[in-house]
Amino acid sequence: MLPDGLFCEDAEEGARLGLLGPMTGISEERRCAGWLSNLEFILWRARNGEPSGFEVGSATPRQAELLRLLSEEAGGWWVYEEAGPVFLPMDEWLRRLQLTPQRR
């Protein structure tokens, strides 16, 4: 039996949930943290083929490509706020990214 909430209304919602998994999984694998501080910025760089900011290891090229594909399909990016992970539409994420140049 599948848990409640496992089915998505559409592919975009599925991509949003699919994106969250690798983001938290990469953080856990690399730093034993469910959501490493500034993870959204670190993985955004990896997604774009830039050095990711992990001292040891990083997202693999395959993981970076998966992050890119899922974020494009989902139309946004996950960030961590006080209550936990929050999905931002791409235009809102890009605005936030521009406002925080020290984390890019």
Image (cartoon, rainbow, N blue to C red):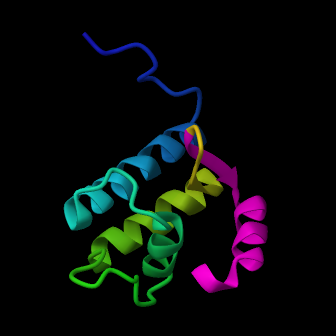
Q: Is residue 33 above or below residue 4?
A: below
Residue at coordinates 59% horizontally, 80% vertically from top-left? 103
Please state, as top left, top right, bottom left or bottom right, where the C terminus lies in the image. Answer: bottom right
**Residue 58 sits above or below residue 95 on the image:** below
Residue 14 in the image: x percent, y percent?
49, 39
State which region is magenta. 84-104
- Residue 104 visible in rendering: no
Quarter location, residue 28? bottom left
* Magenta highlight on residue 78: no
Q: Is residue 30 visible?
A: yes
| Quadrant of image for the N terminus | top left
Q: Is residue 77 left or right of residue 34?
A: right
Q: Nearer the viewer, residue 75 or 103?
A: 103
What residue is drawn where x is 45% and y is 65%? 39
Front-lying residue, 82 or 80: 82
Residue lying at 33% horizontally and 50% vertically, measured from the top left: 34
* For residue 34, side relative to residue 97 (left or right): left
Looking at the image, residue 83 sits to the left or right of residue 89; the answer is left
The residue positioned 29% from the left and 54% from the top of the image is: 25
Mostly what secondary structure, the magenta segment?
A: helix
Position above or below: 35 against 42:
above
Where is residue 73? Give x, y as percent.
57, 55
Total marks shown come to: 0
Q: Residue furthest top?
A: 1
**Residue 82: image x %, image y %?**
59, 44
- Residue toward you, 32 or 87: 32
Q: Relative to 51, is 37 above or below?
A: above
The residue lying toward the viewer, choosing from 86 and 13, is 86
Residue 71: quarter of image: bottom right
